[in-house]
Amino acid sequence: MTSTHSHNGEVSADFSSHSTVSDARNAKPDSIAPGEIAIGVVIGRASEYFDFFVYAMASVLVFPSVFFPFEQQLEGTLYAFVIFSFAFLARPFGTVLFMAIQRRLGREVKLTAALFILGISTAGIAFLPTFQHLGFYAIVLLALLRIGQGIALGGSWDGLPSLLALNAPQNRRGWYAMLGQLGAPVGFMIAGGLFAYLLSNLTTEDFLDWGWRYPFYVAFAINVVALFARLRLVSTPEYARLLDERELEPTNALEMTRSQGRNVIIGALAALASYALFHLVTVFPLSWITLYSMRSVSDFLIIQVIGAGLMALGVVASGLIADRLGRRTTLGACAVLIAVLSAFVPTLMNGGEFGQNVFILLGFILLGLSYGQAAGAVTANFPAKYRYTGAALTSDLSWLVGAGFAPLVALGLSAHFGLAYVSFYLLSGAACSLAALSLNRALEIRD
């Protein structure tokens, strides 16, 4: 933060002397380097994704046994996925609620309240009594805490991704757009590695009794630290001024929807293929392997962690590709590749360990290439006045439509009708993306 403090001094000198051209240049809102903004984006997104994957993995490996012991494992997993989806349903409401709080009380109050709710929700899950001790009230509390996580994640929107997109050099927008997306593979690698370690070193009884709670303690600690780091970042004078100069302030959600509803819908659908693939290479395969394979779950998690490492490389590559070809072209090409991959889901998932590994590794690479530019599709279409709220709600809807129900739908379809229906599900996501991108010429123009 030394450069930030030095900017503070420069800005003070600007207002006191108004003497030199260089001072005037320093007073411009672009005096903060995009790299500084990127640090805040990566910190915030990595912590969110770690929390996200900890809950997702627990929904497969833990919750069916400790909260739904009265059901068969398949039904228990499907029930756990229903509760998993509650956060995605709650997130847009959290965004709208906390936008109103920010308009009345300020950005710092909003982020502090989001931190408080997220901390209570995640820590609450870590200490939650199981069905054996509390009966159906345990399930109700789990659902409420999951809703709390969703509301808090909606409230934690700080505008930094939009600020990063607006301050990136014209010919490097794809590169800077991908930086925040690196949080996804980083979060998965930490969460997957942690669960793999616990499964390998604890007995099943110990893991289901107390071991599964440890990742939630870690998630709580990481989220508190990360949100405080972001709070310190956005409350500095430089960032406050830069956010104000770029008009990154909340607007009324109803007004924004009336004015920009078309952009919200197209923006949500443009990256649908990527969001659909997101859970079909992370959460769904883990559930399918747990239910229908004799493979070691910890070994499979290690393969997924390796895949997440390849995804990180794909995210980085997406920035280079998008700056050369444009974000719209990159997203469209990835949607076509995802459609091709969808045809091979049954063959690969039924192809033993080798086929499953190929699906996971290829899927993660393709996810990195597509998801790396998913955020770039969010902010480009909105006028400055609506960009802050529009970007947040578009992201919420992308997650809800593309990913919120993906584990539930994919597992339910594959269990009752076969893996071929998972192919159709993924193909439909790719088709929606291509249709939205064909309508959305604004992305191409702004690239």
Image: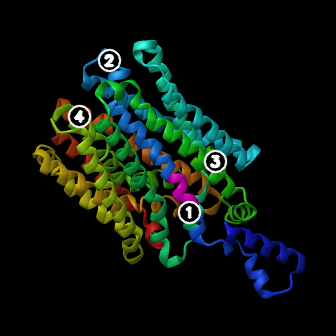
Q: Give the alpha-carbon distance from disc 4 to disc 2, as whole Å.
A: 16 Å
Q: Are marks 2 and 1 in contact (CB under 8 Å)?
A: no
| Crowding near the residue tagged with mark 4, few <14, some 14–19, many ≥20 C-alpha atoms within 10 Å | some
Q: Give the alpha-carbon distance from disc 2 to disc 3, as whole Å.
A: 46 Å
Left or right relative to 369: residue 285: left
| Crowding near the residue tagged with mark 3, few <14, some 14–19, many ≥20 C-alpha atoms within 10 Å | few
Q: Residue at x 39, y 74 (%)?
A: 320
Residue 255's tag is 3
Indicate which disc, 3 or 4, sits on the residue closer to the N terminus: 3
- Which SS class for mark 3? helix
Indicate which disc, 4 or 1, sits on the residue closer to the N terminus: 1
Q: Residue at x 45, y 55 (%)?
A: 183
| Crowding near the residue tagged with mark 2, few <14, some 14–19, many ≥20 C-alpha atoms within 10 Å | some
Which range of residues does the magenta coloring cover? Answer: 38-45
| Crowding near the residue tagged with mark 1, few <14, some 14–19, many ≥20 C-alpha atoms within 10 Å | some
Along the line of sight, which residue is nearer the eye, 195 or 319? 195
* Residue linked to disc 2: 69
Task: Name the residue type under label 2.
Answer: Pro
Residue 39's tag is 1
Indicate which disc, 1 or 3, sits on the residue closer to the N terminus: 1
Find residue 236 and report its horizontal and vertical position in percent: 73, 60
Task: Name the residue type under label 4.
Answer: Thr
Task: Name the residue type under label 1.
Answer: Ile
Q: Give the alpha-carbon distance from disc 4 to disc 1, as whole Å.
A: 37 Å
* Residue linked to disc 4: 290
Q: Quadrant of residue 248?
A: bottom right
Residue 438 visible: no
Find residue 260 and report its horizontal and vertical position in percent: 56, 53
Q: How is the image coloured?
A: rainbow
Q: Nearer the viewer, mark 2 or mark 3?
A: 2
Indicate which disc, 4 or 2, sits on the residue closer to the N terminus: 2
